[in-house]
Structure formats: C-alpha cells, structure tokens
Amino acid sequence: MSKAKTYEEKTEKLITPIIEEFGFELVDTEYVKEGSDYFLRVYIDKEGGITIEDCVAVSRKFNEILDREDYIDDMYTFEVSSPGVDRVLKKDKDLERSIGKRTLIKTYNKIDGKKEFYGILKSYDKEAITITEEETQNDKEFSRKDISLIRLSFNFDN
C-alpha cells in the first residue's frame, strides 16, 4: 500500500467519529503533493451544505488527534473542506445521491471519438454506470474500469 493510501485510511479511521459527532458525512480523504508541499485534505458534507464554521470545528477537534498520533512523516498542511458543487463521485453513496442529476464522465480512452460525455445519471452497479446523453437523449453505459472521472456538472448557459 502506498504511503498516501496508508495516511488516508488512518485519517478516515480517526476522523470519522468526530465527523459523525457533528452530524456530518465524510465524503473523501486525500493526501497529495502539490509542487513541493504536501496536503492532507478531508472533505465533509451535510444536508444543506457545509459552512466555513463547520470546517473550522472539525479541523480544531482533529488537530488535537493529529498532534497526539503524529503518524505522518512529512511536513504537511491539514485542510477540511466542502466537496464543492462539482464534486467527484467516487463512492456508491455519491452515485446514489446523484441519480437524476447532470454529470460529466471522462474516459481513459476515446469512445465513439470522444473522451467526455455529459448526461443525466440514470443508474449504476458494480460494473457499469449509465447516463442519458444530452446530445442524443439515448442511454449510454460505461464500464467502470473505462471511467477516469465522474463528477456532477452544471450548465450555467441556460
């Protein structure tokens, strides 16, 4: 297991009780290097959306645990954030919550000459995700292994 994955899993284990105590949901955890800096990011959500005050409350409470546990070797910055409106859909619970919403699917390789598809999320299972394409209004099924990214998408032109 990679160092990043190890840190992410340990963080999720330690922070989940705090997040649940506040009545929030853990959306994602990531440990990434950007330039020469490392970041440990936790994304949280709740019905109606997350506020800055929510992020600060979780951050303050978890900083005590980070100091005590001291399980990350690198110098890093810890951040708590909302996943944002264009959130990446990584887990089945994200997909379930997004049924009927406009999504963008990006694929690793071209399918029918393109790598980006917009449509309404229709269904998903262990193997595939189906959208109703905007261009054709036809259902299009994608194998999960072919998808590099799926996220909510908003059309601000209308």
Image (spheres, rainbow, N blue to C red):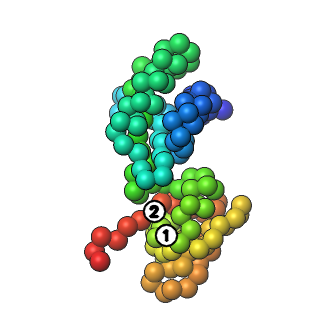
Gap between marks 1 and 2 measured at Cα: 7 Å
Query: Along the line of sight, which residue is nearer the eye, 37 or 84?
Result: 84
Question: Residue 136: where, in percent of width, then height?
Answer: 49, 87
Residue depicted at 56% across the width and 15% down the height? 69
* Circle 1: element type: loop
Residue 118 screen position, x and y as percent: 46, 73
Tell me which residue sits at (41%, 65%) in the image: 153
Q: Amino acid at mark 2?
A: Leu
- Which quarter of the image is occupied by the N terminus? top right
Q: Report the side of 98 relative to 144 (left or right).
A: left
Residue beneath disc 1? 101
State the residue at coordinates (59%, 74%): 122
Mark 2: secondary structure: strand
Q: Quadrant of residue 129?
A: bottom right
Residue 116 visible from this viewpoint: yes
Return the residue at label 2.
Answer: 152
Q: Residues within 10 Å of mark 1 (few under 14, many from 20)?
A: some
